[in-house]
Image (cartoon, coloured by chain):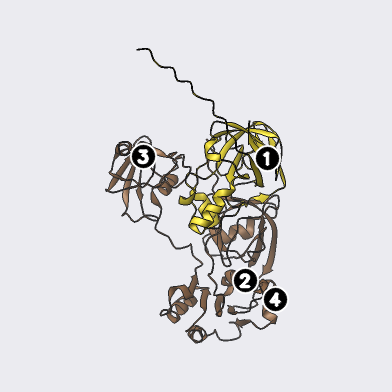
Amino acid sequence: MAKAIKTVSTVVSKVEDLGNDTKRFTLVDQDDWELPPFRPGAHIDVHLGQGLVRTYSLCNDPYDDRRYVIAVKREREGRGGSNFLHDLVEVGQPISVSLPRGGIALDQEGTNVFLAGGIGVTPFISAIRHLERRGRSNYVLHWTSRGRPVLTDMIAPAIEAGRIRLYDTTAQAKPVIAAIVGEFAGSGLAACCGPAAMLKAFEDAVSAWPEERKHIEMFTPPKVIARSDVPPYELYLSASQKLATVTPDVGLLGTLDALGVEVPVSCGGGICGACRTRWTEGPPIHRDRVLSIAERQNELIVCVGDCAGQRLVLDL
Amino acid sequence: MDAIAIEEPEVTMSWQGVVRYLHKTPRAFLPMRSFPSLELVAGRGIEGDRYFVGHETGFYSHKPEEGRQVTLFEMETLEALQRDHKIELLPEEHRRNVTVEGVPLNHLVGRRFRLGEAIVEATRLSTPCRHIEEILGKSVFDPLINRSGLNCKIIAGGTLRVGDAVRPI
């Protein structure tokens, strides 16, 4: 059986070397179809093959819906994603990406204060292009860069209008983050993306701010969101003799997927019954809306199921 | 005592509906695009759509199904979502191909009916999927249970246009 399609198929339409070890990649649909929509500052997982998956912010305007534009700085000592993109990805190459996630909930009326370090500017470029297109100027970007910043061409009008403050740290001091955000303590949104020290300074500066008024964008993989509220449990598949631990962030279905077990999931919400599976040890937690009480004695809808005990055994 | 023979009266349906919107998309996850007409091909599907038999690239292509050749959705459901749940679901967002008005989709399973110049046979009711919530960012899964449209196979093909009549055979 063919595997379920879980990613968006794109093709590299442009690769630009911007200097300063940074390349900009434009991804499009093979027939120039619109791509799935995204919010300003959203990011995508880029699947580079052989399990290499990296997350990059989209830096084009969400209105520009036929492209995903990412900018990648080469990290020579990194984990391999940026080197792969810099060395091996060319125009015309197919690349699978995830649906876009996340984004910055911009303050529509108050000031949006963006703080970026180097390539960490990418989510703010998307946000700035979005605001500028709508005729809004209620933002300011403080952007530090070691040497000449790249990607300035994407926000040239905003730089010209004086809404972007550039700091070349080879020639001048880094900005004092607490002082910058302190001006806006009473209203607006503050957002930061950059190296760890910058994020730490930002977090300290906005620690007393309400959550909805601050946004931190990490370079590292996205925060894990718990999909269930049950403690970890052991999963044993009796037919294939596979063993794994189900954790709340991965969930039962994610664990089955990781084990390479193809379960015929359809609705993903516990109503169609396509993924009903026999269980022999549990007891399971049933969250479906299709099985009768009698059926639940030996069957489980795994797309929404879990285990109430320490060990779940499925006939898979 | 002799068994009493009960003769089932033949049910005739008297509704008549209309095609309001037509959509297709070539690959999984890509937005649906609106068209003034679609080409329905008997036994295969809609030309250029992700579930066209022989060129399947849709989310459910790993689970081939006759009834996914053309899918229908009720205009009235979009209105109900707005009225009852304050959710604005647009015709291009439900991800079915044909948005109809005045057609009792839930009563057509197992029946053949005319869709413009084509003839289709309803195989089963569509089921909502969490996948649509992921794409749209709208909580429509629960409100769409039991009114998520109709899956059909194409018995006789033809060009289907916005404004075409939908009627029983």
Observer-nearest residue: A71 or A74? Answer: A71
For label 1, the crowd category at 10 Å Cα-Cα, with few meaning under 14, some 14 to 19 and many 20 or more, is many
Chain B's shade in the image?
yellow
CA–CA distance in space, label 3 to label 2: 49 Å
CA–CA distance in space, label 1 to label 4: 53 Å
- Position above or below: B3 against A282: above
Residue B167 percent across, percent down from the top left: 64, 36
Say if mark 1 contacts mark 4, CB within 8 Å: no
Chain A's shade in the image?
brown
Residue B6 percent across, percent down from the top left: 45, 20
For label 2, the crowd category at 10 Å Cα-Cα, with few meaning under 14, some 14 to 19 and many 20 or more, is many
Query: Viewer-nearest of labels 4 and 3?
Result: 3
Query: Viewer-nearest of labels 3 and 2?
Result: 3
Could you say whether the residue bearing mark 3 is in a helix, strand or loop? loop
**Which kind of residue does numbered mark 3 sit on?**
Leu
Residue that label 2 marks: A125
Residue that label 3 marks: A291
Could you say whether the residue bearing mark 4 is in a helix, strand or loop? helix
Residue that label 4 marks: A156
